[in-house]
Amino acid sequence: MKKLLLLIFVAALVKINAQSITIAAAADLRYALDDITKLYKENHQDVKIDAIYGSSGNLFQQISNQAPYDLFFSADLSFANKLDSLKLTSGKPTIYAVGHLVLWSSTKDVSKGLDILKSNDIKKISIANPVVAPYGKRAVETLNYYKLYDIIKDKIVKGDNVSQAAQFVLTGNAEVGIIALSLALSPEMSSKGKYFLIDEKSYSKLEQAYVVLKKSEKKKELLDFVKFLGTKKVKDIFSKYGFKLPVK
């Protein structure tokens, strides 16, 4: 009986002391951030980390409406800056990486670049919703830069976020997609298709930033995780998924 009571007490104590971090993250980070949190938990098994992925714009709206997130990883610095201007953040946003656009397909030869989009063989072109997703906005910018948007606009299908846009191509609901390099390099997609790196001059810079949300600024486990984000191991993971690291 005493042993049973002791076990119950220990279990209750563990539950009381449970530490958790809830992250709202741009969809292009689905694989990179999963690797980062997995690496962190190797030495912090008592910390529970939940990552919610979506478009930066939709996550921004959720946070503005008091969604219970601790940390926000945006695919565009502007959304993090907006939260800062609303006084919902602790400290200024930190740029953690610069993203890239690619043209990706599992069935078409994309080696010649964006001109393939004019082909009659291409019926559907997948992009993220440009209203809420930075990668979708940049996709439209690059199509306009090469004077392709008006030619192919009727072929465009839009995902809620860039991860969904990638899934459209992966599942055959579109022949090609303009998506994030980080997704093209993911374990799920890298062996199933090819990508063409789109010239960065054709779209505005994808500076990606994270910010600690003010309501969570005193959480010790969160501050420790943020410190971990500055380590070489984390930077190596971002590089693995094709992100450029910010130059200080």
Image (spheres, rainbow, N blue to C red):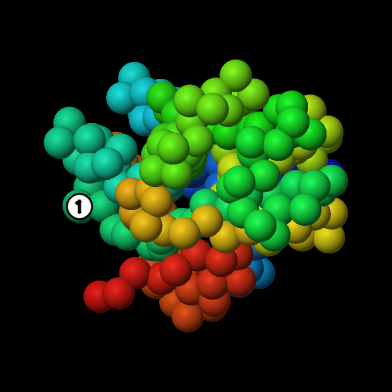
Q: Position of residue 119 (x, y in %)?
A: 71, 36
Q: Is residue 224 visible?
A: no
Task: Locate residue 9 relative to residue 93 in the image: left or right.
Answer: right
Q: Which residue is mark 1?
A: 91
Q: Position of residue 177 (x, y in %)?
A: 65, 40
Q: Residue at x 31, y 25 (%)?
A: 64
Q: Position of residue 229 (x, y in %)?
A: 43, 66
219 lies above or below 229: above
Q: Position of residue 183 (x, y in %)?
A: 65, 52
**Quadrant (top left/top right/bottom left/bottom right) for the C terminus:** bottom left
Task: Locate residue 154 relative to residue 235 in the image: left or right.
Answer: right
Q: Residue at x 79, y 28 (%)?
A: 173
Q: Is residue 155 visible?
A: yes
Q: Specify the quadrant of the image occupied by residue 78.
A: top left
Q: Tag 1: residue type?
A: Gly
For the residue pair 196 and 214, the one nearer the viewer reads as: 196
Q: Residue at x 33, y 49 (%)?
A: 204
Q: Specify the quadrant of the image occupied by residue 138.
A: top left
**Quadrant (top left/top right/bottom left/bottom right) for the N terminus:** top right
For the residue pair 145 and 196, the one nearer the viewer reads as: 145
The residue most toward the bottom is: 232
Q: Residue at x 69, y 49 (%)?
A: 104
